[in-house]
Image: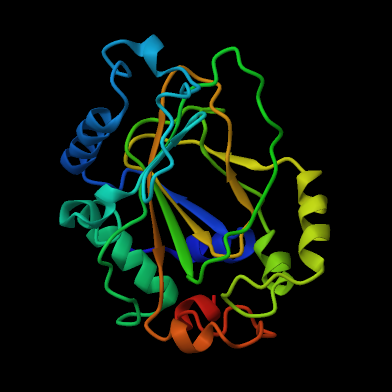
Amino acid sequence: MKLNLDDIRFFKENGYLIKRNILDKALMAKAQERLWRFLPEGRSPKRPNSLIGPFNDKEEDRSHPNEIYKFRVNYRSIGHEPWMVRLLAKDPNVWSMAEQMLGKGCLQEPDRIRGIYCTLPFGNYPKPQLTCHVDGHPFHLGVVGYIDDVAPTGGSFTVWPGSHKHFYYAFNSQYKHDRNEEYRLICEYYNGHQPVDCFGEAGDIVFWHHRLAHMASPNNTCNVRQAVLYDFKKTDIDQTQLGPPSDNMWEDWSTELRDS
C-alpha cells in the first residue's frame, strides 16, 4: 500500500494521518487473547461490567515494564515477541508507508513495539480535562494501531492538528527531550482548543509526527480501548538528535515528502 499525494500533504499540514483496515485480523485476535489473560483476576470480557474502571488498590501494579493503574493498562512485556512486531511495525503496509515518509532503507529494524495500551471505561467517574503533551524520547514517526473498535469518545488517540509545527521549535534539539521556555506557553494555547478524536475500527492505524500534541482521551463508552504502538526511527538518529531544530522541519524526511 502506498500513500497518495493528498495523504502526504494532509500529514505535513496536520501532523497525523489515519489509514483504515490495515492490520492483520488473526494477529489482532491473538493480541486480544493475550491481553485478556494479562488482566487481573475477575476482569474479563465475558463479564463486561467487570471491565469498567478504575482498578482497585490490590489490582494496581507499577512494576517495570508493565503498568496497571487507575483506568490504564500498559502491557509492555509482550512487545518484544516477533508476532507483535509483525502485527504493527513490520506489517508490510505499515512499513511501506513509513518508508515512504522517512526514506526507503533508512529505518531502524524493530526488535519490539511499545506493547498493548488500554483505557478502561470511566463509567460514572468524573472525566478529566483534555490536556495535551508531546513525547520526549527520540523518534521520528509514531504509529498507533487499534486491535478492537474504538467509538467516538471511546478513549481514542486524540490529537491537536498542526501543533507539530509549533512544538518542533519548543525544544532545543530535533529529537531529544530538552524543552525550552516556549513549551509551556504552546501547551496552554492548544489546551484552549478542541482536539480531534481519532476514533476508528479494528485494524485502523494513526501515523503521527513526533512533536505532535496528543493524549489518550478518557473512555466514555462501554468497551476497553485497545491499541498497539510503535515509534519509527531512522538509522542516523543518534547523530541527528543532537542537532538544533532545522529551519525546514522536514529536512531529514524522504525526498517525496519534502517535495510534496
Quarter of the image containing the C terminus? bottom right
80 lies above or below 146: below
Name the residue nearer the viewer: 39 or 14.
Answer: 39
94 lies above or below 19: below
Quarter of the image containing the N terminus? bottom left
Residue at horizontal 76 percent and vertical 72 percent from the top: 180
Name the residue nearer the viewer: 195 or 188.
Answer: 188
Name the residue nearer the viewer: 205 or 118.
Answer: 118
Residue 86 in which image quadrant: bottom left
The image shows residue 64 at horizontal and vertical percentages of 38, 50
Residue 37 in which image quadrant: top left
Name the residue nearer the viewer: 116 or 146.
Answer: 116
Residue at horizontal 38 percent and vertical 72 percent from the top: 100
Please give left or right for residue 176 compared with residue 81 in the image.
right
Number of on-image labels = 0
- Res 21 visible: yes
131 lies above or below 43: below
Please give left or right for residue 45 compared with residue 53 in the image.
left
The image shows residue 97 at horizontal and vertical percentages of 36, 65
- Res 1 visible: no
The image shows residue 191 at horizontal and vertical percentages of 77, 45
Please give left or right for residue 253 compared with residue 131 in the image.
left
What colour scheme governs how the chains and residues are painted in the rendered image of this protein? rainbow
The image shows residue 254 at horizontal and vertical percentages of 45, 80
Residue at horizontal 35 percent and vertical 82 percent from the top: 106
